[in-house]
Amino acid sequence: MDQLTSGTAKRPVIICLSEAGFLLAQRLAKGIDADIHGHALRCPQAPHHFGKARAHIANLFSSGRPIIGICAAGILIRAVAPHLQHKSSDAPVLAIAESGRHVVPLIGGHHGAITLSRTVSELLAAELAMTTAGDVRWRISLDEPPTGWRLANAGAAARVMPQLLAGDGAFLDGEALPELNDWFAHVPRGGAVTLTATRQQRTPTETQLVFCPQDILLGVGCARGAAADEV
């Protein structure tokens, strides 16, 4: 029976379809917090089982679970294709060769798949096949800032990034820029777009992305029983 583990909505699932895949899944699971789901007949030792791979993968994807498939990329693509919504919300999907030598992010590149793929490739000492333009050129995804930061105007990324990819470069500014200098190290300098790192409220221009550190805490005190709309 197909199984979806309750209470682990964001926990990755490693899919294995063979004994060799299960052995690799065990090796990988030691380094990341993930569940192992194996084909009921081919991977009887797996802690969670499924019968029909395509239906099970589709259910996991629709529930928002990141999927690490130790199988052909085509199996994963055919399973999730009818359920794709938007690159900003689709769950990460990546494929790993059964040999453990290659890792390929397929879906959700800028929604966690790139970061997860890097982690997996490092754990397995595997080659990471990157195809997203920003990661290939600059080794970062501008719409997926590092831990502790957020892109304040994430909706503008699709408009701003093509201008930067055209080759005209970026102007970097903001009082918090020194904290992101290493992250921006491979971004070409120029004047096509502006990348701002700040703790201040900004109204971005049409060609600006604003990155904000999430390091400010706000405490609010109130009398017991106060209504939420009064706070």
Image (spheres, helix red, strand yellow):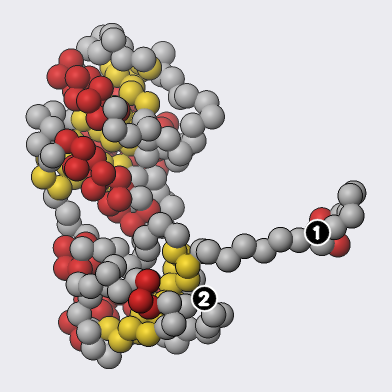
Q: Nearer the viewer, residue 174 or 132?
A: 174
Left or right of residue 93, residue 204 in this image: right
Q: Secondary structure at mark 2?
A: loop
Q: Position of residue 79 (x, y in %)?
A: 31, 35
Q: Position of residue 32 (x, y in %)?
A: 33, 34
In this rendering, the count of numbered labels is: 2
- Relative to 139, is 104 above or below? above
Which residue is the site of mark 1?
A: 221
Q: Position of residue 54 (x, y in %)?
A: 31, 28
Residue lying at the far bottom of the rendered structure: 191
Q: Nearer the viewer, residue 150 or 220?
A: 220
- Relative to 102, is 187 above or below? below
Residue type beneath disc 1: Gly
Q: Secondary structure at mark 1?
A: loop
Residue type beneath disc 2: Arg
Quick one: label 1, few (<14), some, or many (20+) residues within 10 Å? few
- Relative to 52, is 108 above or below? below
The image quadrant of residue 220 is bottom right
Which residue is the site of mark 2?
A: 199
Q: Position of residue 72 (x, y in %)?
A: 16, 33
The N terminus is located in which quarter? top left
Q: Is residue 75 visible?
A: yes
The image quadrant of residue 193 is bottom left
What residue is at 90 percent from the left and 49 percent from the top? 225
What residue is at 25 percent from the left and 30 percent from the top? 28
